[in-house]
Image (cartoon, helix red, strand yellow):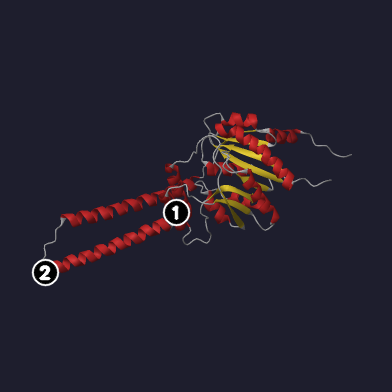
Amino acid sequence: MANKAKQLDVIVPFLNEAESAIHFARMAVELADAVRERFGLTTRFILVDDGSTDNSVALFETHMNGDWKLLSLSRNFGKETAILAGLDHSEGDYVLLMDADLQHTTDVALDMISRILKDPELDMVYAVRANREDDRLLTRWFAGTFYKIMNMGQRYEIPENAGDFRVMTKRFAAAMRQLRDRKRFNKGLYAWTGFRQERIEYMPAARKAGATKWSKRKLIAFSVEGFTSFSVVPLRILSVFGAFVAILGFLYGIKIILEVLFSGVAVPGYPSLMVAVLVIGGLNLALVGLVGEYVWAALSEAKHRPIYILKSVSGPAVQQTAVSQEMPRTTEA
């Protein structure tokens, strides 16, 4: 009996991608054919609807071909959680993560698959954006500063400009399933998990349709989740700054006392008092707010609510599983 071909699961989270659904369905056929011809792998697509409010689900169900299943979450839980839902329903020997907006191209995906198949010691290949020249200078500075702070004092490094476009082995996927963080920051989880990883550079393709679902507000909130999940450095920075302000205040107090005792200088009270109150008050408010973020992250983990709720599962892959479970077992005489 011939050995069963190994399987590649392609996890595709999406949110309101009705305009890209038909284009992605066509690309999926091309990707599955190329994977079969070049690597001898079967391909199963696991699409995860992260609470879409348009007709994305109906379009994907209508136009997808081959082996696929579609998981519909009960509401929008976020892309990080949608990826976990896909991993929970994955059984493949290899897992490819990609977006439905076609910015993650077939050529790059095939390159990553080729690299992980050639090296048995490699557990993940991830794509890193080659450059961010189209971003504003301030945006690039904030991004660079964010990763520098995140990686300070860590025993692992979160790579800059890396997203969710990556391929992993079955054991890496199993390790990711063990991490049941409610406030998920996948970039940090990929790095924290360890194993041998390799990077490749790529440039995202232009969107064929639709618009990005990320906004500046969401990016800031996502960054805060990264800090509260993987770094204590912001608290330490504020603590050091607070100590520095306290030392300055102490020295300024000594200066005032000496001026009064030896020079008889009348010290104006209102301006200096207002500066001290504003600086120390603002610092305290910032520290309380930051501590609140950490407390909220800890509280979210302590509640032990389900990370996501699955509303429905559809697709030929689901039907095949149901049929195989209903078939009666036969025994040899």
Q: Residue at x 66, y 53 (%)?
A: 115
Disc 2 marks which amino acid?
A: Ser
Q: Residue 202: x percent and y percent?
A: 57, 49
Disc 1 marks which amino acid?
A: Phe
Question: Which one is in front, 242 or 104?
Answer: 104
Residue at the outermost front position: 133
Using the image, tell me which numbered label, if any, was put on residue 263: 2
Q: For this view, does 184 lie left or right of residue 175? A: left
Indicate the quadrant containing the C terminus: top left, top right, bottom left or bottom right: top right
Residue position marked by numbered label 1 in the rendering: 146
- SS for callout 2: helix
Whichever of labels 2 and 1 marks the residue nearer the N terminus, that label is 1
Q: For this view, does 311 lie left or right of residue 273? A: right
Residue at the outermost right position: 333
Could you say which quadrant of the image residue 268 lies in? bottom left
Give the CA distance from mark 2 to mark 1: 49 Å
Q: For this view, does 90 lie left or right of residue 228? A: right
Question: Which one is in front, 272 or 59?
Answer: 59
114 in relation to 65, above or below? below
